[in-house]
Image (spheres, rainbow, N blue to C red):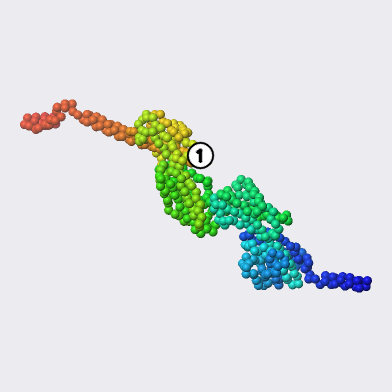
Amino acid sequence: MRPMSLVLFLSFALLAFSAGHTLPGLAEWESRDQKVWVREGSSAVLPCHLSLRKMRKSLKQLPDVTSVQWKRHGGSVHQEPHGVLEVEFPGLQKTAQLMKPRVSLQASALRNGNFSLRIDPVWTEDAGLYEARVKYNTEVHICHVELGVITVTLNPPSPVMENELVLMNCNSSHQASLVETCWFHNGHLDSTSRTFCFLSGTVSILRPSMSDAGSWRCQLRYSDNKIISATYNLQILGFDGPTNPVVYAAAGSAAHLPCNLSHLPSSLQINAVTAHWSHLGGGHLQDWGVSQNLSSRSFPLHLPLVGPGDAGHYRCAVSVGHKTISRNVTLAVITVTPSIQGPVSEGSHLLLICSLTHSQGHERFQWKHLGSVPSDSKLAVATPCNLEDHKAQMGPTLEIPKVSQKDIGTWECSVYGPEGQLGAVEYGLQMTGAQVSNPLAVFSGQVTFGLILTLFLLLAACVVALALLKRAKTPAFPALEGMFAVAGPWMSMKENQKEKIQQTEC
């Protein structure tokens, strides 16, 4: 009994001595094991923080004589650890060659008790158990963090092309058996979700479109009831806009056919992009020049003048590396066919037929009289007088029973769809021998006529005044107007007798 009592006494004494000489705070500093899951290619932060109580004890800031050492055990704690990152004040740093420069510590946070390790980006082989050992003075702080990596892979690799089969696979570094994999897609505009669950971690998209782009989340469930998930943003290189766009253009006008990629090539690390257009018209294939532009995602085709023969299906093919995606664009041409060619005589019966090539079946037509003066603008607005005389008429055919002066001018046929006006074409109606006038011309003619009439009246008044003046000066005997007196002998005798008489009287 005595030996047994002696052993117990010595054991208690040893425990008491050990407790009294343990490094201060070692047991309370040591952190519990933590587990961090991240997706491969993203960044990870392995947390390691000093407790608030210890920070208060060390006056809220650590001394300059501090060292931080991160090590990695690999897949388990039984593997031999190897150094990851070591920092010693006043600034000495050592980094493992394989993880340089992907690992770092936030220098400004070290003195505040934050020793977290940042890995950016994370690789699959980074998975394993990490240990941090922080020393200052006689204190030691230890953190254990397990890093798990979830891998999402694409086949073929990014960029994913529209209408090309793609396989998405999801797995993780967890050691248990995989029971089920579920995929959730939330990329729709209406925020609806699609769910796919399989035994394996692979989901296939047969003909991916732009609606399949967006956020995909894979959820892995293992035999130990562990559930791990990761989110992946799927980017698909395709075309913006509707799948089969239709461009409406008036005969005789220009047309612009769109070809817009969903992403800027440079944003997807694409260094070579070429695009070309083709059109099968009139039984032969037409090709347009190849364009290259990495700073833009738009490759439109400009047709300066289109007619009914230019209508049809055009193809824009964009080559990215060894892959090519294409989109068809339909050009629909709007034309007006009159029942009478050329100028129309007054009183004639006229039909204007508005037709559309490659109709989609949902179009509707509307006729409007824009004015008496032909307009070059498709946006011309009818005058109030025209709107009263010619209300907008629906249907592809406009009937004018008897053509009159008020019908002369520009008529517009507009094509409408569910989304609004699609296009318009104009027709200028001319009448044989008719002179089209406008209010300005009529006003100018009236002014000219008034001036001429005024001048004529003034001239007539001047003529009458001159005639009256001349009449007032005419003598009583018109026959004597042309006679004149000539001095003779008898006239001299009579004048002498007059002088004598005057002298006698005096």
Bin the neighbour count of mark 1 within 10 Å (Cα to Cα): few under 14, some 14-19, many 20 and up: some
Question: Considering the image in quadrants, where does the N terminus appear?
Answer: bottom right
Q: Quadrant of residue 307?
A: top left
Q: Is residue 286 left or right of residue 3?
A: left
Residue beneath the point at 62% across and 60% down: 41
Please say if 497 is above or below 164: above
Q: Outermost residue toward the right?
A: 1
Image coordinates of residue 363 in percent, x first then y, are 49, 38
Front in this rendered view, residue 174 or 96: 174
Q: Quadrant of residue 70?
A: bottom right
Residue 56 seen in this snapshot = no
Residue hosting label 1: 417
Residue 198 seen in this snapshot = yes
**Considering the numbered disc 1 on the image, is that residue within a helix, a strand or a loop?**
strand
Residue beneath the point at 65% across and 55% down: 230
Residue beneath the point at 11% across and 30% down: 498
Image coordinates of residue 428 in percent, x first then y, are 39, 37
Q: Quadrant of residue 468?
A: top left
